[in-house]
Image (cartoon, rainbow, N blue to C red):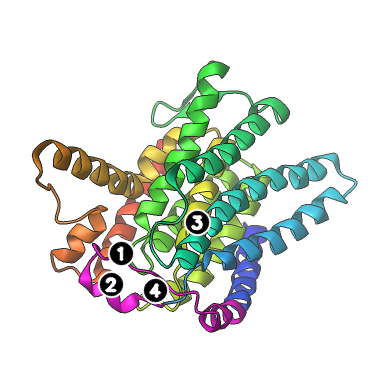
Amino acid sequence: MQFQTKIVLLSFLLSVVISLITIPILRKLKVGQIERREGPESHLKKQGTPTMGGIIMILSILILGIFISYSYIKSENPSEIAIGKNLIPMIAVTVGFGIIGLIDDLKKLIGKNTDGLKPSYKMIGLLVVAVGFTLYLTQILNIGTDTYIPFIKVYFTIPIWIYIPFAVFVLLGTTNAINLTDGIDGLSTSVTTIILTCLTVIGIMFGIKEVSIFGSILIGSCLAFLIFNLHPAKVMMGDTGSLLLGGAIASLALYLKMPLLLIIIALVPIIETISVMIQVTYFKKTGKRVFKMTPIHHHFELSGWKENKIVSVFSLITLVCCIIGLIAI
């Protein structure tokens, strides 16, 4: 635990330094947030706030992740070498999703609109990364298809032909859910940090060192980013950050063989996603809306809740869900 704490602190300090360098550069380059016209009017004042802040996380993960991975790989201990090698795919899938988000953000900035990449192109990119990581887990690392069932506390072996599309769905679904959760200053970062902490604690409990190491790097980076992302935000993570964080959560859950645990600990992002699905389906059938605006955090915002209140309530809900999740294992 002391080792993981040191990594969190190191990642935090590194990310703060990167943030202090990167944010002024983004501001100078006028890499500003472009708000949706159909979004809340209060968000229009955020127009021009530096975005693509997920670059900070990418740099932090690459610098510290590669350094720690190399430190383990050059060891003469076979178990430590394995830990170092297993860190690389987790770094790759997380950064891979972040790069897809970065391309999407750049497309929005170049076009000066909120369209970004064509949905089909974006999905293909995410699919390539998701399939690549899934095949690594099943064909190279050979971790098996055993999946832990919370509360029942048993492992269930899923046939490989079902597991591969299931794992891909978990990766794509989680990245989309975290992406939808990103819409209010500090919301996605706060909720994600709690979820990542839960998964990292599980990694420590089960003695899966690569998970606890990578999780600690992510936690430190998120905490540092939160300093600049809380309301009023000095930088937005953009799709660069939200897709990166979604990929990180899903990859850790799959590596732990606990993707079903996300139903509990990632309840807030799931509700955000379901609210959009309900809104779209109901509007197509009736022409009316169930919520004032979706994702659901905008509904509460238009109902009079302040941004900080929404972040606090959603974070507390996530914390309780994570405690339940820990009890469930």
Q: Which residue is drawn at the image coordinates 67% and 33% (left, top)? A: 136
Q: Is mark 2 on a helix, strand or loop?
A: helix
**30 within the magenta span:** yes
Q: Distance between the residues labelled 2 and 1?
A: 9 Å
Q: Nearer the viewer, mark 1 or mark 4?
A: 1
Which corner quadrant holds the C terminus? top left
Image quadrant in which you'd find residue 304? bottom left
Residue tagged 2: 43
Magenta stretch? Answer: 20-48
- Specify few, some or many for label 3: CA neighbours under 10 Å numbering under 14, 14-19, or 20 or more: many
Q: Which of marks 2 and 1 is in front?
A: 1
Mark 1 vs 4, N-terminal side:
1
**282 within the magenta span:** no
Residue tagged 4: 230
Of 268 and 206, which appears nearest the observer? 268
Which dot marks residue 36? 1
- Examine the rendering and report whether any part of residue 314 can be seen: yes
Which dot marks residue 104? 3
